[in-house]
Amino acid sequence: MISIAVFCLLTLASVWLFNRNIGRIRKSVLSGREFSPKGNFNEHFSTMLRVALGQGKMVSRPLSAVMHIFVYVGFVLINIEVIEMMVDGFIGLHRTFHFLGSFYDFLIGFFEILALLVFIGVVVFWLRRNLGRIKRFMSNDLNGFPRLDANAILIAEIFMMSALLTMNATDQVLQSRSVTGYHVAGSFPVSKWITFCFSGMSSDSLILLERGAWWFHIMGIFAFLNYLPFSKHLHIILAFPNTFFTSVKPMGQLNNLEAVTDVVKPNFDPSYVPREIDPNATPIAFGARDVFDLNWKQLLDAYTCTECGRCSSSCPANTTGKLLSPRKIMMSTRDRMEDVAKNKAANGGNFVDDGKSLLHDYISAEELWACTTCNACVQECPVNIDPLSIIIEMRRYLVMEKSEAPAALNGMFSNLENNGAPWQFSPSDRLNWVNENQ
Amino acid sequence: MSTSNLKVETMAEFAARGEMPEILFWVGCSGSFDDRAKKITRAIVKILNHVGIKFAVLGTEESCTGDHAKRAGNEFLFQMQAMQNITVLNGYQIKKIVTGCPHCFNTIKHEYPELGGNYEVIHHTELVRQLIAEGKLSVQGGSFQGKKITYHDPCYLGRANNIYEAPREIIAELDADLSEMKRSRAKGLCCGAGGAQMFKEAEKGNKEVNIERAEEALASQPNVIAVACPFCNVMMTDGVKHFNKEQEVKVLDVAELVVQANNL
């Protein structure tokens, strides 16, 4: 009875805490500026099915694609077994669903194979990450917590899968001894190979071990759930909304700034009626200086990033030693959002100026100016994050609000204004090529 | 300078006669002013003249599309340029545009509609492929037959607009040996010029992007590095010079390949 009470309390506490933290992130993301993704429901839904559910963009790197599929499918399907564990926990029985008979045996056997595949997947991931000399995992972007975060999750997964298999192995020995409560149920194609480790132990020790593994696994899941909001692993949830809300548009298309159109277009088209502006509203600056100036999709992108670094490993600037790293753009954005959320929490829900901003304090102008807008980062991201849109917004702020473009670009701008070309050529010479010899 | 054998008419001339061309050729700033890119412009015109397409250029009425300004964050300047061009294009009731540059192509196609400029826009490699498919242009390999050609995907044609096959199909017509670089198509590495980088020094790093890309292109020891963008052309040419390979390896636009192979 006590164990049922403890289990119910822990379940409630972890669900409550998770809900609270997810609510905080939700609020933080929705505080972003307005954004309407292009595309209709069907297009959004099919993007989500293809990219998130179907892992469509993972395939470009086959080894990690296969290992990731193991971990992903294992995670999703083993959680079906967790439903049974929850029911067992609430009513204090053992393997409640065994009445399903041979189908139950099939399921448990299937989950064991998945557990083994997950185990293999995370071990390979851990080895690659730590011994593989892979640049994107050795990068300075990951110094400190991010590196610890990545490894902690992999190690935790190894322990979780070991606990699951230990639970099943001890259960088998107990079942074979017809110990009270351990009725025969399930098939164990994987853990049967490790039962020999436990066959010499007394039934009391086995029960202790079996219960211990059961509690470890279920508590591990609760702990993981509540670790998610603080970890890059949040992608397992946010990948779905983030791919769903991706704009359906060609990658080359940058958004139009309507506020600029309202000023420019009337000069060319007298019939154009600018949007109505509320005279009492605070004027909005062009571009982005801080996270307050980004739209909610850009903020969702930041929380969805799992720091895999495929973006940076394909970035022409990053791979030639420039400071710019698209992954770091996303990580800095999330860091700033977290700092803002802490600031708000400490000041009764209102943000108190901390003298910092995303631009300069988290992301430098040097990083922003190194971008070639080639879209390789956008192409590579397995969960449809768009680091380029943040880079462009911040360039807009630097140029239109601060006039802080590199000197050479200011020269290009004035050529454009004066000659209608980025170089110092006279517009009257535009057709000279017709009469020039090769 | 001698008189040209190219037949080029401006939109103003067409309008004066009350005529409409089949298509407007958007030359772009590089194609108009840059010495290397002007050769690509002439190659495109030779193809258009050869198949007898009735086309016009805007000439002195053309102005920069504003792509570099927009990507450098100067939305004001971009929209000023865009509106100026849209006013001219709409004034002539232009319906169809072919561009010689992927940046102009992308900007007019995707960023002008929201400002009131709606046109059917194609890149010159798409037009050439179409002409071949329709039997209006027959391409022989000529001097490129059996030569090794590698193709560099411009970001604004490839990733930005999913045009990977048109240039490759044209190269295939030349009976050449098309060798792909390690990073190609959607994984193609930028030449380093986009996003207004063309007009500024690169940030501090350990290598120039175009050197990295040229090294990759030269790895398969090609006779020709084919490109489809005037900016990529400049960057790749500089990269090839960096490795002192300009005698053995030519950097040529796909349109130039067609013209040279067929003595147009």
Image (spheres, rainbow, N blue to C red):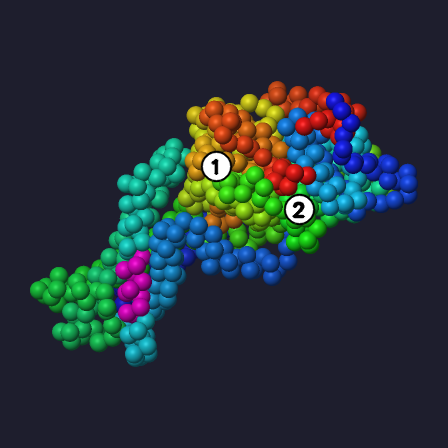
Labels 1 & 2 near each other (Cβ < 8 A): no
The residue at the far left in this view is A200
Dot 1 alpha-carbon crowd within 10 angstroms: few under 14, some 14 to 19, many 20 or more: many
Q: Position of residue A33 (x, y in %)?
A: 62, 43
Q: Is residue A173 in view from this perspective?
A: yes
Q: Nearer the viewer, residue A160 or A414?
A: A414
What amino acid type should be assigned to the residue bearing mark 1? Pro
The subunit carrying tag 1 is B
Q: Quadrant of residue A264?
A: top right
Quadrant in which the N terminus of chain A is drawn: bottom left
Q: Position of residue A38 (x, y in %)?
A: 64, 51
Q: Nearer the viewer, residue A333 or B164?
A: B164
Please tell me whether residue A37 belongs to the stretch shown in magenta.
no
Q: Position of residue A427 (x, y in %)?
A: 77, 25
Q: Where are the magenta residues, as a range?
A: A108-118
Q: Nearer the viewer, residue A139 or A374?
A: A374
